[in-house]
Image: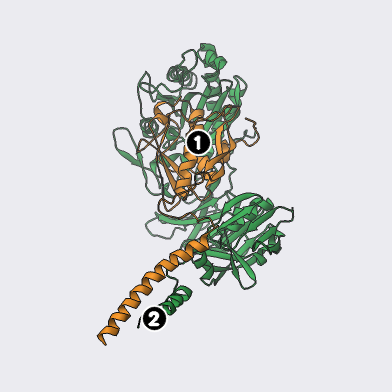
Chain colours: A orange, B green
């Protein structure tokens, strides 16, 4: 009686262990040849070679518009990660003849998404301290970031720019940054060649 | 003894592998989880609307490709060898799907889907996002899925989201309709209801829960395809409607004013004409008596600078002083300056000075800069509330205090101070249009002469307000001109004539004074689009 109890316990333990192993093996086997879908949470490793095509915004020839330029950006594992990669790509010095509206040396400190789809983009102090000033420059700086995010990630409802971890009034004395800004196609010129 | 136990183990193991599957692959789980039928979505096409059956699988709404095929002109073909599915659009472009893979190849471009396509009997189910992510780019058709309202918009249809909020103050019920994207509208009073008809294919409404009261009985969708009906109660007297455009959205405010029946209030003679406004918040005769001139930047904030060293803060102060002299000397106006020296003044202080002194006009003077040295010319700006979604308009009615100098506050009906400008946007647009005309005859204008943007300094100004960019300091010719007294005088003359024309228009009631249109006139003021005024 006692012996058969031990046997049963042994059998059940083995079953559970084997089933777990079996499930892992099974899932690996089923997944072979299937690319793992990006997990929605947690730092899922992403194949750095995978890229998406994103429309990033640069200063148009007329100096008062933004022009979209399709560029390759690394695939992000999550929406927040994708947003981060889009901003990082935008902050890189662009190849000639593209002209970035964002002061050189600006770095992305952090990027957070809220459940309501608002992105908080925390930029290093250079975005303000190295800003050349002038309303048009400021508008194009702000909307190259807002539109690069909201055009490529249509789920985003708004973008608020933070400077050095803090909420900012303005970058150069004009554009109100105290609330998230929605996408605005008003500054985009699809027709102006670069 | 060992062998039978081993056999037992194998048997149990086999059972667990076949049926128990403790950690199945996610894609497999989605396939295995039976999709439950869910409430159908409504597809809105330019000429028709049709239901689209969907099923719920986990957190995904799944739709059968068979149901999509007639809507988008797709043909489906199973790929016998690869086990995949080829979806071909009428233009020949193709989408490739593989079962179990949450990916699609749309005309050669890889699209990541939120769930893998699954087979349900003889039908293929795909997540609803397959429409905007794969079908839309391949067919070249606009597709928008609105989950909350269970709508799928296809092609060139206008289905603005209309969010209605209700507030009550002083017996007046104020309904604020945020229309996104903006659509033209008409308000008509028919019997015991108000009808708001929108220029749209259909509406995507968010209606408030209304407790039936003496003034307002309910808010519902009207009979037309894009109509909202406001059911009025027995105490309804009159209404006022006004509209403003904020970037892509518009905001319609309808105020329901009760008929006077309280004994405490003077009883109007029974024969009083109904057209007389019962509550007039606007000043009796708006004019222009006090002007605040805001010389941009100053002190620690030089603003923009030019290649030969001109500073924005110096140019703006020089023009501001000349403008003050002519407005005082030639028009006899009361003129206040936000700074009269090289001083750092915060943006809040600038608006507060104008609010405290009940200024009738706020003119902010600036000089611009561009990364392109060839960019030149003057521009006139007024405020747009470009807040995300409806957030900006939602808070605009939350509080009623404006900052005044010295730290106090002054109550203003129902407008949050930092968005006080919203109610004056129509008049600001009118002044901007006049100023653009006057400048154009005198100095070079930019290719984009009148613009709207979310300005920090204009937002809190509780009066018509514009921001003038007098030229581009980064352009050598503009910089040279802006430093000369002659050019500065041309700008001052344009401003002087604009103030004169604006004052005349205001005194004759031509500019859109806020909330003064008498009921029951359907009020549909033109959007303050950057355009020239009608002569």
Residue B282 got which mark? none
What residue sits 55% from the left and 55% below the top?
B161
Q: Is residue B269 left or right of residue B49?
A: left
Residue A1 visible in the displayed image: yes
What x and y, as percent, mark residue B89?
71, 56
> In terms of secondary structure, where does tag 2 sit?
helix
Among the 4 quarters of the image, the one containing residue B80: bottom right
Which residue is depicted at the point 39% across and 33% down? A124
Disc 2/disc 1 C-alpha distance (Å): 67 Å
What quarter of the picture does the C terminus of chain A occupy? Answer: top right
The reply to whether residue B244 is in sight is no
Judging depth in this view, the residue of B215 and B33 nearest the camera is: B33
Residue that label 1 marks:
A90
Tell me residue B181's x, y (percent): 57, 49
Q: Is residue A159 above or below residue A19?
A: above
Do dots 2 and 1 share one subunit? no
Q: Is residue B22 left or right of residue A100?
A: left
Question: Foreground mark, 2 or 1?
Answer: 2
* Subunit ID for the residue under disc 2: B
Q: Quadrant of the N terminus of chain A?
A: bottom left
In the depicted view, which residue is nearer to us: B193 or B175?
A: B175
State the SS at label 1: helix
Residue lying at the far left of the rendered structure = A2
Vertical placement of B345 versus B227: above or below?
above
Residue underneath mark 2? B3
Q: Which residue is at 48% across, 42% downward?
A: A85
Q: Residue at x 49, y 33 (%)?
A: A92
The image shows a total of numbered marks equal to 2
Circle 1 chain? A
């Amino acid at each position: 009686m006692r012996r058969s109890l031990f046997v049963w316990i042994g059998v059940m333990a083995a079953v559970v262990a084997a089933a777990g192993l079996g499930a892992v093996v099974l899932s690996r086997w089923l997944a072979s040849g299937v690319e793992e879908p990006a997990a929605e949470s947690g730092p899922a490793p992403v194949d750095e070679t995978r890229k998406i095509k994103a429309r990033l915004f640069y200063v148009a020839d007329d100096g008062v518009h933004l022009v979209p330029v399709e560029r390759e950006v690394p695939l992000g594992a999550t929406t927040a990660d994708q947003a981060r990669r889009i901003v990082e790509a935008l902050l890189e010095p662009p190849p000639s003849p593209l002209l970035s509206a964002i002061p050189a040396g600006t770095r992305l400190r952090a990027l957070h998404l809220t459940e309501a789809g608002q992105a908080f983009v925390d930029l290093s102090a250079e975005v303000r301290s190295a800003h050349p000033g002038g309303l048009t420059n400021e508008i194009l700086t702000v909307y190259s970031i807002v539109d690069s995010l909201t055009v490529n990630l249509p789920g985003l409802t708004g973008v608020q720019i933070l400077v050095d971890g803090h909420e900012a009034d303005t970058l150069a004395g004009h554009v109100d940054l105290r609330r998230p800004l929605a996408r605005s196609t008003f500054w985009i010129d699809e027709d102006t060649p670069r | 003894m060992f062998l039978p136990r081993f056999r037992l183990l194998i048997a149990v193991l086999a059972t667990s592998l076949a049926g128990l599957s403790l950690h199945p692959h996610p894609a497999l789980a989605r396939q295995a989880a039976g999709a439950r039928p869910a409430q159908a979505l409504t597809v809105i096409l330019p000429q028709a609307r049709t239901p689209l059956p969907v099923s719920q699988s986990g957190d995904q709404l799944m739709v059968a490709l068979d149901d999509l095929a007639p809507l988008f002109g797709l043909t489906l073909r199973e790929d016998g060898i690869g086990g995949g599915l080829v979806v071909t659009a009428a233009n020949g472009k193709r989408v490739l799907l593989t079962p179990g893979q949450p990916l699609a190849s749309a005309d050669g471009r890889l699209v990541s889907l939120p769930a893998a396509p699954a087979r349900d009997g003889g039908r293929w189910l795909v997540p609803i996002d397959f429409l905007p992510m794969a079908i839309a780019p391949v067919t070249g058709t606009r597709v928008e899925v609105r989950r909350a309202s269970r709508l799928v918009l296809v092609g060139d249809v206008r289905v603005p989201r209309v969010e209605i909020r209700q507030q009550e103050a002083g017996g007046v019920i104020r309904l604020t309709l945020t229309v996104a994207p903006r659509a033209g509208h008409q308000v008509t009073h028919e019997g015991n209801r108000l009808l708001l008809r929108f220029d749209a294919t259909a509406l995507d409404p968010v209606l408030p829960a209304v407790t039936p009261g003496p003034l307002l009985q309910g808010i519902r969708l009207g009979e037309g395809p894009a109509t909202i009906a406001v059911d009025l109660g027995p105490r309804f007297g009159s209404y006022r409607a006004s509209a403003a455009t904020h970037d892509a959205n518009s905001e319609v405010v309808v105020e329901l004013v009760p008929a006077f029946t309280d004994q405490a209030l003077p009883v109007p003679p029974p024969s009083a004409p109904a057209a007389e406004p019962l509550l007039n918040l606007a000043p009796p005769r708006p004019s222009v008596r006090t002007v605040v001139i805001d010389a941009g930047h100053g002190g620690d904030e030089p603003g923009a600078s030019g290649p030969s060293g001109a500073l924005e803060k110096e140019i703006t102060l020089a023009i501001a002083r000349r403008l003050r002299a002519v407005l005082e000397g030639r028009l006899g106006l009361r003129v206040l300056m936000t700074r009269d020296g090289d001083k750092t003044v915060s943006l809040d202080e600038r608006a507060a000075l104008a609010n405290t002194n009940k200024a009738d006009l706020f003119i902010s003077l600036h000089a611009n800069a561009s990364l392109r040295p060839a960019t030149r010319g003057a521009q006139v700006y007024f405020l747009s509330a470009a807040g995300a979604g409806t957030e900006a308009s939602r808070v605009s009615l939350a509080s009623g205090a404006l900052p005044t100098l010295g730290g106090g506050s002054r109550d203003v009906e129902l407008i949050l101070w930092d968005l006080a400008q919203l109610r004056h946007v129509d008049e600001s647009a009118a002044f901007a249009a006049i100023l653009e005309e006057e400048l154009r005859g005198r100095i070079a204008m930019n290719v984009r002469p009148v613009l709207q943007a979310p300005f920090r300094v204009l937002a809190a100004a509780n009066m018509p307000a514009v921001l003038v960019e007098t030229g581009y300091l980064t352009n050598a010719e503009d910089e040279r001109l802006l430093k000369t007294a002659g050019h500065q005088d041309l700008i001052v003359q344009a401003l002087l004539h604009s103030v004169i024309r604006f004052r005349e228009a205001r005194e004759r009631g031509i500019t859109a004074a806020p909330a003064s249109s008498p009921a029951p006139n359907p009020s549909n003021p033109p959007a303050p689009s950057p355009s020239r005024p009608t002569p």
